Image (cartoon, rainbow, N blue to C red):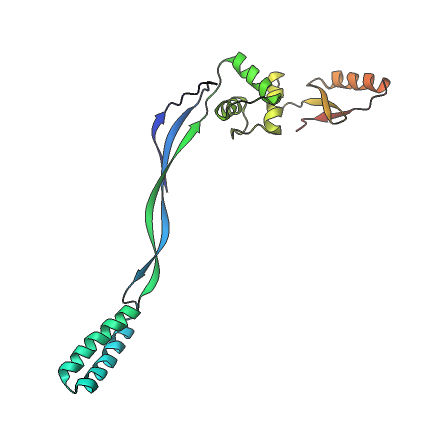
Amino acid sequence: MRLFAIAAMPVLVASQAFAGSYEVRCETKSVPYEDTVKGGNPEKVIGGAIVGGVIGKVVTKKNAGAAAGAIIGGAVANESSRKTVTKYRDVETCTNVFIPDRVTDEATLQQTLLDLNAGKSVSKEMVMDVQYTIGVAYDGKWGPKSQLAAEKYLANLAPDAPLYSLVVNDVVIVSSADVNAIDEIKEALLEAGVQSQIFVDLQ
């Protein structure tokens, strides 16, 4: 299989700009297909010729008839000895692939992260750019791992640093890298009669 890029194709989107670009990428694969071929069994052709010769001679009582019968018998046997074989042919397919790039404008990046974590609509291209920038899998889908990475980025945390979240009734009240601050809020809620839980890197 060979994989190569033909050309970069800029794509314009009216609603949202993005850092990456589209490229047409092509690959060639060997695709199997079935074909029918003649003369698969020589013994059938020879046998057919012999039978055809005998029948031709019996019917015409002449050697010429035997020769004609042999030819016809061989042709019939050859026709009946077809078989199906698997062959291969090269097929090239091309697709328009988006190649993400870093979002260099910090204000745009932070606002997009806030929008995504708030569930707002963002173009798939921009999502992939943002994912690429904050270091998660850039699949264009904003899931729990992307949300967690966004929270850490907005909190100026390293990707492997723990993020503590205080949860009340399955709702995240606050998230922070400071576990002591989270614990103080939990104690204050407990004094008010509200039960809460602390989770690390909640996804």
From the viewer's side, name the closer residue of 126 and 65.
65
Look at the image and tell me whether residue 49 can be seen.
Answer: yes
Look at the image and tell me whether residue 160 can be seen.
Answer: no
Q: Which residue lies furthest to the front in this view?
A: 59
Quarter of the picture containing the C terminus is top right
Q: From the top left corner, tell me how far across and down residue 175 is, in percent.
A: 69, 19
Q: Residue at x 22, y 84 (%)?
A: 54
Q: Which residue is drawn at 20% across and 85% down?
A: 59
Quarter of the picture containing the N terminus is top left
Q: Answer with the quarter of the image where residue 116 lies.
A: top right
Q: Answer with the quarter of the image where residue 52 lies.
A: bottom left
Q: How many labels does the image show?
A: 0
Q: Residue at x 23, y 76 (%)?
A: 73
Q: Answer with the quarter of the image where residue 164 lies.
A: top right
Q: From the top left corner, tell me how far across and down residue 99 is, in percent.
A: 43, 27
Q: Which residue is drawn at 25% across and 76% down?
A: 46
From the viewer's side, name the closer residue of 155 and 128.
128
Horizontal arrangement in the rendering, residue 14 relative to residue 113 (left or right): left
Q: From the top left corner, tell me how far across and down residue 24 is, in percent.
A: 37, 31
Horizontal arrangement in the rendering, residue 76 relative to residue 8 (left or right): left
From the viewer's side, name the closer residue of 154 and 34.
34
